[in-house]
Image (tube, grey):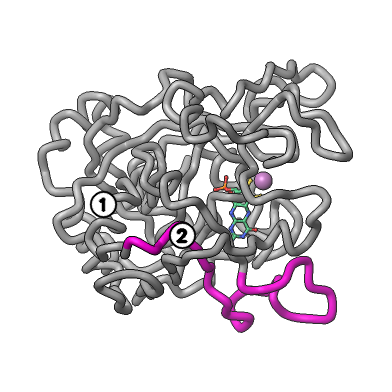
Amino acid sequence: MLIKAPSDIAPSEITPRSVYLSRRGLLAGAGALAGALAFGPADAATLTAAKSPFSTDEKPTPKKDVVSYNNFYEFGTDKADPVAYAGKLTTSPWSVKVDGLVGKPADYALEDILKGVALEERIYRMRCVEGWSMVIPWVGFPLAELLKKVEPQGSAKYVAFETLKRPSEMPGQKGVFQALPWPYVEGLRLDEAMNPLTILAVGLYGETLPNQNGAPIRLVVPWKYGFKSIKSVVRISLVEKQPETTWQKQNPGEYGFYSNVNPEVDHPRWSQKTERRIGEGSGLFAARRPTLMFNGYAEQVASLYSGLDLRKNY
Ligand SMILES: Nc1nc2c(c(=O)[nH]1)N[C@H]1C(S)=C(S)[C@@H](COP(=O)(O)O)O[C@H]1N2
Ligand SMILES: [Mo]
């Protein structure tokens, strides 16, 4: 039998999750996180978060799958590499450089970004371009809150994001074979970035993010393929021109800037009509479910793309 030390038992394990969240939801999330950050990278700490009306009521994917089946090429290209190798990444102290077309450019310490921010639990469907999906209870806050604070200028039309480049702690960035150009970069149109569904996540399942899921802060854009949800963000730049993205650079014939989940537009090498929900069934018997337009978030985001040919702008 595994005996847990008391400090390892999160209140969420003792109290039913819904009760726990509503009881503690009024407490300031950022204060809890500032405390949590002091625990350092390896120790998950409990976060307090209010429930969000943007959450799906679908059953979350088991936590063991969410934290062990990952894409994070900085640690290797195998799904099992991130959980095996990301543990050594130093995530504290952490700062995010905000620059470009903003009134308040600076290197912002993570603690300062989170000051006065109310954390929310957002249970989102996530779909990888590879054809699998999960339902993940993220803890985070709208990216729009941060963007408003830094005062985007009128000429800013896009937001560019960058992941940490640190080969000494990221084995996938070392050696002769490099899977991708580094640093990993992504981008959104400013209106996509300001959409209330777009969040910066600092936790999942009520605790600080495990390194393999993009600690200490990562983007989550639930209506786009998983690769747009860039991990371990160190830079956010407001720019005038559409920024390049890692997967576009790596394979422009297969990956476009928008990358909205779209069952009607096949990937050049496979269909995007169905998906396999991780944690449901297994192997040959795993039923595939239909993939929904904009991953099921059409009501909230379809209007962003009116007038845009989604076959050309994939
Ligand atoms: N920096 C960085 N961010 C990344 C990736 C990556 O390799 N590097 N992989 C992306 C892909 S393809 C997916 S599907 C999601 C997976 O997120 P998860 O492991 O938290 O489920 O992260 C995305 N963000
Ligand atoms: Mo992905």
Above or below residue 122? Residue 238 is: below
Would you name the residue on which mark 2 appears? 159
Asked whether, in this view, residue 43 is left or right of residue 158, the answer is left
Q: Residue at x 34, y 44 (%)?
A: 139
Q: Quadrant of the C terminus?
A: top right
Where is residue 75 drawn, in percent x and y?
A: 66, 66
- Crowd around label 2: few <14 · some 14–19 · many ≥20 (10 Å): many
Amino acid type at circle 2 is: Val
Amino acid type at circle 1 is: Glu
Of marks 2 and 1, which one's residue comes earlier in the chain? 1
What residue span does the magenta drawing correspond to? Answer: 154-183
Q: Is residue 130 visible?
A: yes
Asked whether, in this view, residue 244 is left or right of residue 147, the answer is right
Above or below residue 98? Residue 49 is: above
Q: Secondary structure at mark 2?
A: strand
Where is residue 3 drawn, in percent x and y?
A: 40, 45
Would you name the residue on which mark 1 appears? 145
Question: Which dot marks residue 246?
Answer: none
